Image: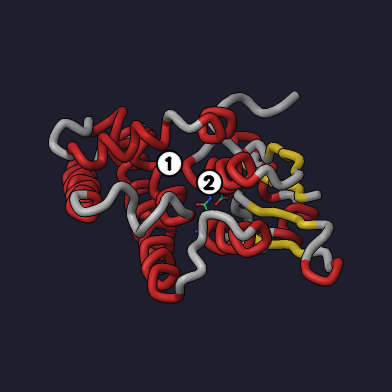
Amino acid sequence: MIDCYTWTTDNGYKPRVMLEETGLQHRIVPVNLREKAQMAPEFMKISPGHKIPAIVDHDGPGGARVTLCESGAILKYLAEKSGRFYPSDPVTRAKVDQWLFYGSATFTTLAQQFGHWTIRSPVKAPTAQVHYDANLRDMLGILDRQLASGEYVAGDYSIADMTMYSDVHLHGVNDIGLADYPNVRRWHDAIAARPAVQRAWGPFPA
Ligand SMILES: N[C@@H](CCC(=O)N[C@@H](CS)C(=O)NCC(=O)O)C(=O)O
């Protein structure tokens, strides 16, 4: 059984999608960021940087209890555990890693800054807004060029796609619009139609 500590944010949806896609047995544990639940000492034993998502796998390798934070590390762990959405061919796997790291370290991080300065901040800072708007459009362009030659980011649908889908869905579709990025539009809509993705983006289970 895997406990998935999460909330309704871009990073929070990533392990939920992977858990739904793989069918690994899991339990969702909401961590209410608005109420600062991530600062609870018990949670910070699992995620020292007080960030969701995090998981506890009660049946890890050799029966070990594995605690893990960082969405990229969690996606990779779940991929290795399930043997799904992570190619075995070393060359394709290296490319999945490249886009997985780009997605979690660069794409989401900069998209979050866009979300903060352009959408949520009550203080308007035009320089930051222009900067992060340009960043997000640049990243959508990079993704669009990558998707011009393949259905998914690196070979078949994989954890590399899962890590970038959240911010494309939240900010690409809703805030920027994907009219200038037809390959990203096609990719987004194919992923959005997946039943596992729809379940993962639904309400928390009661
Ligand atoms: N690099 C981390 C970032 C995680 C992250 O930014 N989590 C945010 C929500 S999306 C969070 O928990 N923020 C609460 C806090 O920092 O106190 C990952 O990929 O998991």
Name above or below for residue 150 compared with residue 102.
above
Q: Residue at x 62, y 39 (%)?
A: 20
Q: Residues within 10 Å of mark 1 (few under 14, many from 20)?
A: many
Return the residue nearer the eye: 64 or 118: 64
Q: Position of residue 135 (x, y in %)?
A: 21, 51
Q: Position of residue 129 (x, y in %)?
A: 22, 42
Secondary structure of the residue carrying numbered label 1: helix
Residue 109, picture quadrant: bottom left
Kind of residue at disc 2: Lys
Q: Extreme left residue here?
A: 180
Q: Extreme front residue here?
A: 89
Q: Is residue 124 left or right of residue 70?
A: left
Disc marking residue 14:
2
Q: Position of residue 160 (x, y in %)?
A: 42, 56
Q: Is residue 131 visible?
A: no
Q: Residues within 10 Å of mark 2 (few under 14, many from 20)?
A: many
Q: Is residue 140 left or right of residue 86?
A: left
Question: For the residue with label 2, is its CB less than 8 Å from the closest atom of ligand 1?
Answer: yes
Q: Residue at x 43, y 61 (%)?
A: 100
> Whole-Å distance between the Cαs marked 2 and 1?
7 Å
Kind of residue at disc 1: Ser
Q: Is residue 126 visible?
A: yes
Residue placed under numbered mark 1 in the picture: 166
Q: Is residue 125 left or right of residue 11?
A: left
Q: Earlier in the sequence, mark 2 or mark 1?
A: 2
Q: Residue at x 86, y 66 (%)?
A: 63
Q: Extreme bottom residue here?
A: 90
> Decide: marks 2, 1 in contact (CB < 8 A)?
yes
